[in-house]
Structures are given as C-alpha cells and as structure tokens.
Image: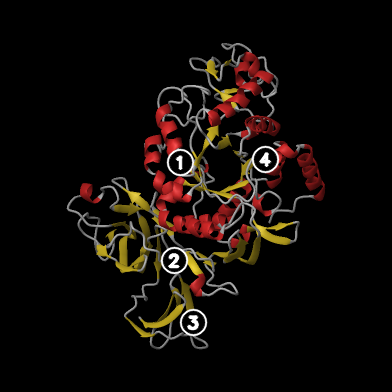
Amino acid sequence: MRKPISRIYAAALLALTASAGTDANAIGWPENYEGVMLQGFHWDSYADTKWTKLESQADELSKYFRLIWVPNSGKCGSGNNMGYMPQYWFTNHNSSFGTEAQLLSMIKTYRAKGTGFIADCVINHRNGVTNWHDFPKETWNGQTWSIGLDGICKNDEMADNPSQPKPTGAYDTGDNFDGCRDLDHTNANVQNNCKNYVKCLQEKYGYAGMRYDMVKGYGGQYTGIYNRYADVEYSVGEYWDASYDAVAAWIEATGRTSAAFDFPGKYAINEAFSTGDMTKLVWKANGTTDQPAGMIHFGYPRYSVTFVDNHDTYRDGSKFNGNVVAANAFILFCPGTPCVFLPHYKTNKTAIQRLIDIRNAVGIHNMSAVRVLQSSRDCYMAEVTGSKGKAVIKIGSAMVSPDGYTNADIKASGTDYCVWTKTDVGGSTGGDDEDPDMPEKLYIIGEADGNTWASDTGVEMTKKGMEFHAVVELKGTGSGYFSFARSLAATWDALNVSGNRYAPAVDTQLTEGGGAKAFSEAGSDAKAFYAPNGKYTVVVDWPTRTARLESSSWTGIDDVISGDTYAPEEGEAVYYNLQGVRVVNPSDGIYIKISGGKTSKVKL
C-alpha cells in the first residue's frame, strides 16, 4: 500500500499551484469532464488504424468516445514508422497512416459528431531529413520555422560522434533519448518553434488537444509554456513512472496545465490482477481514507488519464495479462478520464460499450466522489457519484451485493465484475445484453472427446444466454489442446477465414476454477488453449471473449422446478459462479439461477 503524500510535499505543491496563476485553471484538462478517451492505435497498426479506416468507424466510435488519441501525423521518413522519430512539424502530414487530406477529412468527420482527436506531440527530440541534424525549414502562419545546432542539447550523443558537428545548446533538462537529437528547451527559438507547432496542430490540422510524448526528457515547466501559449484544453503527458510523487511533481511543474497518464494506477491494476488480490486497487488518502489506487486517489483526479494498457506497455513486461473487461470496468467507474486501449475495445466491444453507456447515464466524471464499500482479496466494491446518479462497481470473484441495491439494479455483469445503479440506462437490466456478433453456434476443435485436430470435426457447444457450454474430455499428449470456431469446414483455409476461428494470442493453459483467459479472432497461425487431460465443462463468455473451465459435474439446466425464491438449507455446501449460486452436493441436485431480480430453483 502506498504511503500517504507528505504534508510538507503537499504544501509545496499547493504553493506551486498558487504561483502558476489563475490562467492555469482554463487549460490542461476540464474539471468535471465526463468523456471517455480511446487510444485509437497500437504498435505497427498501419493497416488496422489508417485514417480512412478510422473515419469509416466514426458512427460507432463517436457514440462512446469523446476523444481519440492517434499517432503523430507528420511525415517521419520513408517506410512504415509510428512517428516517434519526427521530422516535419508544420507541413507535410503525410504519414504511415494516411495522407494529409485523409487526416483532415477524418478529423472533420468526427468533429461533426462531437469527438475530438488528441495529437501525439513528440517535441522531446527530433530527427533530420537526410542526416542527424538537418531539421526541415517550414513555413506556416507567415513565418519560416527552423532549429539549428544551437537548439540541440550539448550532451546529446551527437557530441561524442567525431563525424558530426558539435551541438551548442545547453545541457538537457531531462532524460536523454538515443536515436534522435535531444532538443534544448531552454533555447528561446526552440520554445518558439514548440509553442507554434502546438498551435499549428490545433489551428491548421484541427486537433482538440495534445498527448506529449516522453515528458521525462525535458522540464515540466516547458509543457506549461507551450500549453498556455496555444491555450490547450486537453493536455496529457507520458511521464512513465510508477511513483505517485514523481508524476505529481511533473503535473505541478507544468503549473497544472496538463494531465498525466496514471502509470501508478496502471501498475496497481497489474499487481491486483496478477496476484488475485483486489486490495491492491485501494490506497489510503491522507493515510486514512480508502480510495481507488493511483493518481486519482488524492488530489489529482482532474489531471489523471487512467488506462489499463497502451501501445508501449502492451508489448513489454508491463503488459496487462488479467481480466481485461474487469480492469476496464475499474477505470470506467473511477474518477479521472479513462483511456481505453483499442485492442481491448475490439476484443471486448459489447461489454465495454455497455460499461461506457452506464458511466454516461450516471454522469461519472473525472472528479466524481468515490466511497469504497469493501476491500478484500476477492472483492473491490465502491460507490461512485456522478452528475445524474450513483453506481456501484464490484471487481473480484466474491458473490456479494451492496446494501440498498437489488438484482434488478444490475446493469452489467461478467467474469469477476458487476455494476449496480438505479439510474435508467436502457437495454437489458443484467449482464446478458445481446451481442449482434454472437454466433448461433460455437464448436470446440482440437483434442476434445477423442477428436484430433481437424477442420471438419468438433464438439458443438450449448448456447446459454451470453455463454456457450460443453462437457468434454480433453486428452492429448499430457494435455488436451483446443480452440473454437463458429462453423466447421472441409479445409483449414476455409475454417480459418476472418471471423470464424477464435484462439488465444499465445498457447494458454486453463485450469479448473482457475479463472477466465481471453481469446480473439485468429487465422492460420492460431494458437490454442490447453488443460491437463481430464473431463471438464468448457465455458465461453462471449461478451468478454474469454474461456474458462468448470467442474464436469454441471451438465446444464434440465427444467425449472419453481420460480419462487430459494435459499440453500443450512449445512449445504455452495459454489458461486457467474450465473448465481450452485449447491454442490444436495440430495436432488439444484441450481439457483438469478435473473432480473428473480431467483428460480432448477434441476440439473
């Protein structure tokens, strides 16, 4: 559990804020902001997130996201690149994601629907066009903009290369970045270029705000200078550090003219789900009061952009490997501005859309008050207050309900998460919202029930609400391997067509009662789930695109015995799962199904 921020440090932060002036309150990030943000790309997503493809999705994405962060759109050399070694700032925004005309069309289309774009603003460092330092001269707004050797930090690696001229700027005010020239932000000309580049991105290209890359590379005060000059309403810095105090210090250094990505919160989420300990989602504010973990827990909810993964963490040791929907439910029902990662959204679209609908209906915003109701290893439960109502979020395996709410108030549920609110959201009142992409049939293909891998052989699963179930014996060489398909086919090419085959990203072990694991659309290079040889109930939760194993003794519901409320008798052992409560060893075998506030006794 993180130590509370010191009173001396807090006083110093308040003093810095006061000295920043009243104009700081008008920029950086709006207070009481209710929007949700989307990171609209991932690493090497050139085809998946090109401007024309994103524009074609405007009707859908604009319904759920008020801001979309996209890669740096300036030209950064030939070949595919993500834009993090920038060359052009004011002109030539023909990038690996599309032409300048396509960029402008996309931004205009979304703006008409109320959604703005966040530019990936890379100003810590810059690359030459033909050599290490020949930054292009560009004309915009009646002025020619350029940076010379005096704008490059004197301790840039260029200074140690005998084949290169010596940079004459001041020492770097932050961390060095190898591979590009580190810009000297103490230099007045560099500052003038940066200020007007930010202004150009907003005025010429139509961006709604900035995501500043690698802000550890230069002093935070310079972000404040650039934001004040360009009057940036939405600004968020990538201060990649797990330390609450370090990120807070950067926000203060900007004069609170910028938000920051909540890396401390991201690492708390990672730890909670990797250890199965939901107490890691709670920190003590002032050492006394339970609050959600991260920058949002004390003093900085307005200036916190929360997230589960981004393009960088998704491909390194910081990748989130737990229950994606439950983790997103945590950030969506907390203060701060949630930033949903595109691969998470695409794989769990229906579930995340539902959570955003509830958040919007309740009016949860970046400064919403949170009351933590329960914090235990298997349960994080909190009530969050929005502008239009309240909602309770439960994360973890515990089957518990909040006081004052009934099953009729459940507006969304899934593996290890549940949301209650009395506010009208529309649609279903439970977690079984119909998914338009849900198949009518789903097959287990692979080493199940005596089958070997074949494109035309599989075990048909039984559809139950938003889940598929099948009791199968998995048997292979030590373990049984399998994946899923909407339909079987005569050839592997026919089976592996887009949208038909589903598998995890890497070979993934499932264990009985060991938790759900994610899968997604797969093709010819599909991986597989596997489990020790044995008999199991394989369960697919379609909204969350996850698979899990349950005891093979549960074969499904045969008939309803009674629609009356039923409670297990004293001494009967119970096992809790997503559908409700199952009595494990009663004399007649029963299952308690909870739906829409009604509890039915049914026979197995």
Instruction: Give the labeled residue for mark 2.
Output: 431
Mark with earlier residue (2, 3): 2
- Crowding near pointer 1: few (<14 within 10 Å), some, many (20+)? few
- Crowding near pointer 3: few (<14 within 10 Å), some, many (20+)? few
Q: Secondary structure at mark 3?
A: loop
Q: CA distance from mark 4 to mark 2?
A: 40 Å
Instruction: Give the labeled residue for mark 3.
Output: 573
Instruction: Give the labeled residue for mark 1.
Output: 112
Residue 20 coordinates in the image, percent (x, y) = 75, 37
Q: CA distance from mark 1 to mark 2?
A: 32 Å
In this view, the residue in front, 600 or 279, is: 600
Q: How is the image coloured?
A: secondary structure
Mark with earlier residue (1, 4): 4
In this view, the residue in front, 404 or 601, is: 404
Q: Secondary structure at mark 4?
A: helix
Q: Nearer the viewer, mark 4 or mark 2?
A: 4
Q: Is residue 167 visible?
A: no
Position of residue 172 relative to residue 531, above or below, is above
Residue 192 coordinates in the image, percent (x, y) = 64, 22
- Crowding near pointer 4: few (<14 within 10 Å), some, many (20+)? some
Residue extending furthest left?
490
Instruction: Give the labeled residue for mark 4.
Output: 26
Residue 323 coordinates in the image, percent (x, y) = 48, 57
558 displayed left or right of 587: left
Q: CA distance from mark 3 to mark 4?
A: 59 Å
Tell me the residue at 44%/74% (across/down). Answer: 596
